[in-house]
Image: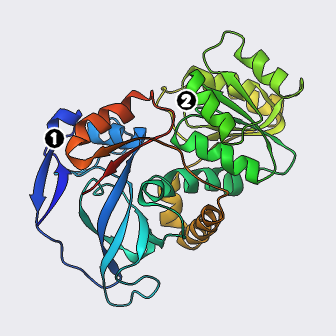
Amino acid sequence: MSRAVMTDQLGPAELYELREVPPRALGPGQVRVAIRAAGISYVDVLTAEGRYQVKPPVPFCPGSEAAGVVSEVGEGVTHVAAGDRVSLSGWGGLFAEETVMPARAVQRLPEGMDFAEAAVFPVSYLTAWHALVDRGQLKPGETLLVLGAGGATGYAAVQVGKHLGARVVASASSEDKRALALAGGADAAVEARAEDWRDQITAANGGKPVDVVFDPVGGEGTDAAFRSLGWNGRHLVVGFPGGMTTLRTNLTLIKGASLIGVDIRQFGEFEPERAAANRAETFRLAGEGVLRPAIAKRYPLEDFRAAMQEAGSGRSAGRIVLEMA
């Protein structure tokens, strides 16, 4: 028997508990993994509380990204073997000591990448890569404005943007988060809640509008960020924890700009081969040290409630990780 964080009713962390769960049967094309660390994102907390746009069925175990050691492989699995260190991503089920996953969701870790880093790498960096490469088609020399640059996907977008040759302007709500974004490679950082926010963005880009906006925040900032785009600009809608926006559609015509949705979950379902290629490339870059997540705090599995509350608060500069014994 292994333990997992479970609930019979979606809601706050207090409704969740550690339960012993029986091992799941392993089928063809599947992999059993002993989990060593699991990342906790803001979206994980929203999903656990039933406040995400897609509500999972109960009983439910949260967690969308983790890392561990393969303990068993099913028939037909050849790219990993028992004993391999791997990362994995999925839709729930990873705040646990063990899981069974489709083999396509498991990636062997590069040397030098520890379990905590690997646990918070796949979702954020695959989202940023898909957004900026596939959807935004960010080009060398263009300017990228990253909203929520101190958060999970925002920090990943800063690093991916710099790797692609863009000038990166990071917007974040606290001094610690702005410092983190600059340490991650941003060329400039602006205060997200400043009254002269748009002026700061323009000044940070030498008086010119920006080319691409990476927006995992939503709310009032979406409208202002879209207005900061230049001709043929692209605004990437990655998430909206700050709420919906009332963006005027005439702005897309006036600017010749595009509003583009980014959904990494459906991308993996509809375009699995491209998703696999993105995964391989981002992990290759992680192995070279080009892409590397920042860990803010680590909690033991038994303290999962405190870890979920910390991740849900959005205060930390860097990622929150659960570590299994």
Q: Earlier in the sequence, mark 1 or mark 2?
A: 1
Image location (x, y in percent) of residue 269: 47, 65
Query: Coloured how?
Result: rainbow
Q: Tell me the amino acid under the disc marked 1.
A: Gln
Cβ atoms at labels 1 and 2 below 8 Å apart: no
Mark sitting on residue 9:
1
Disc 2 target residue: 218
Q: Residue furthest top?
A: 195
Work out which quarter of the rendered image holds the N terminus and state it: bottom left
Residue at 77% x, 35% y: name it.
187
CA–CA distance in space, label 1 to label 2: 27 Å
Image location (x, y in percent) of residue 55: 30, 45
Report whether 289 appears left or right of 109: right
Q: Secondary structure at mark 1?
A: loop
Q: Tell me the amino acid under the disc marked 2.
A: Gly
| Res 83 seen here | yes
Comparing 56 with 140, the one in front is 140
